[in-house]
Image (spheres, rainbow, N blue to C red):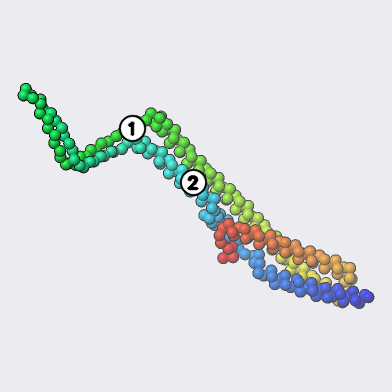
Amino acid sequence: MKNLVKVILIVTICLFGVTISKAQSNNSEIKEDIELPSLQRIIDSVLNRNAMLKYRNQHIGVKETTLASEKIYWTRNFGIQADSKYGNLNNFSTNSDAQGNTAVLTTSTQFNYSVGVYLKFPIFDFINRKHQVGLAKLEVEEAKSMAKSQEDEIRQTVIKMYQDLILKQKVLKIKAKTLADGKVNMQMVEREFRNGVVPVAEYVRITSIASNVEVDYELAKSEFITAKKLLEDMAGFSFYQ
C-alpha cells in the first residue's frame, strides 16, 4: 500500500514538474521586464486621442463663433436697398389758360431704378447688445474651463494607471523570481523524496506551497497584462515597441 502511495506521488511530481516547465516557457512571452514609455509621452498621446476632450475643444470653437456673431449683430440694422423697373410709363398732364384746359397723355417705355441706404435703430438691441456680448464671452470662458477640467482629469487618471502598472510590473517580477526559485527547490525536493530523505507529509506540504506560488504568479501576470492593455488602449500604441 505504501509503495502504491509512493508511486502515485511520484507521478504527481512528474506532472507538476511538467506544469512548472510549461509555465516557465510561457513566462518568457510575457516580457515583464519591458521598458515602459515615459509618462509624458503616454499623457500626450492620450490627450491627443481622447474623444471627450476633442468634443470640449470643438465646443470652444462653437462658442467663439457665437461671440464673433454677437459682436457684429448690430449690422443687421444697417443695409443697402435697391429697386429697378422696366416697362411702359404713362404720364398725364393738364394745362389751364384763358382759352381753356388742355389735357395731354403720353406713353413711353423706359428703365427706372433707385438705390438707397437704410439704418434702423431698435432701442432694445442698443440696450441689450452689451449683455449679449458679455454672455457670449462667459460661455467661451466656460467652455475653456470645461476643457481644462477634462484635460486635468485625464492627466490624473493616466498618472494613476501608469503608477499602478509600474507596481504590477514589479510584483510580477517578484512572483516570477519566486516561481523560478520554487521550481529549483521542487526539483531538489523530488530527488530527496525519491531517495527517501523527505517524508511523504513534508513532500505534500511543499507541493502545495509550490502550487500556491504558481497561482500567485498567474494572478500577478493577469493583473499586469490587464493594466498594460488598458493603458495601451488609451494611448493608442503598444508598449513593446
| N-term mark: 1 or 2 | 2
Q: Quadrant of the C terminus?
A: bottom right
Residue 178 located left or right of residue 36: right
Q: Position of residue 30 (x, y in %)?
A: 66, 67
Which SS class for mark 1? loop
- The reply to whether residue 94 is visible in this rendering is yes
Which quadrant of the figure has residue 196? bottom right
Q: Position of residue 233 (x, y in %)?
A: 59, 59
Question: Which residue is tagged 2?
Answer: 59
Q: Position of residue 82 (x, y in %)?
A: 26, 39
Q: Residues within 10 Å of mark 2 (few under 14, many from 20)?
A: some
Q: Position of residue 141 (x, y in %)?
A: 49, 40
Q: Is residue 1 above or below residue 53?
A: below
Which quadrant of the figure has residue 149? top right
Farthest top residue in view: 98
Q: Amino acid type of disc 1?
A: Lys
In front here: 236 or 206? 236
Q: Amino acid type of disc 2?
A: His
Cβ–Cβ below 8 Å for labels 1 and 2?
A: no
Q: Quadrant of the N terminus?
A: bottom right
Question: Which residue is tagged 1?
Answer: 120
Farthest left residue in view: 99
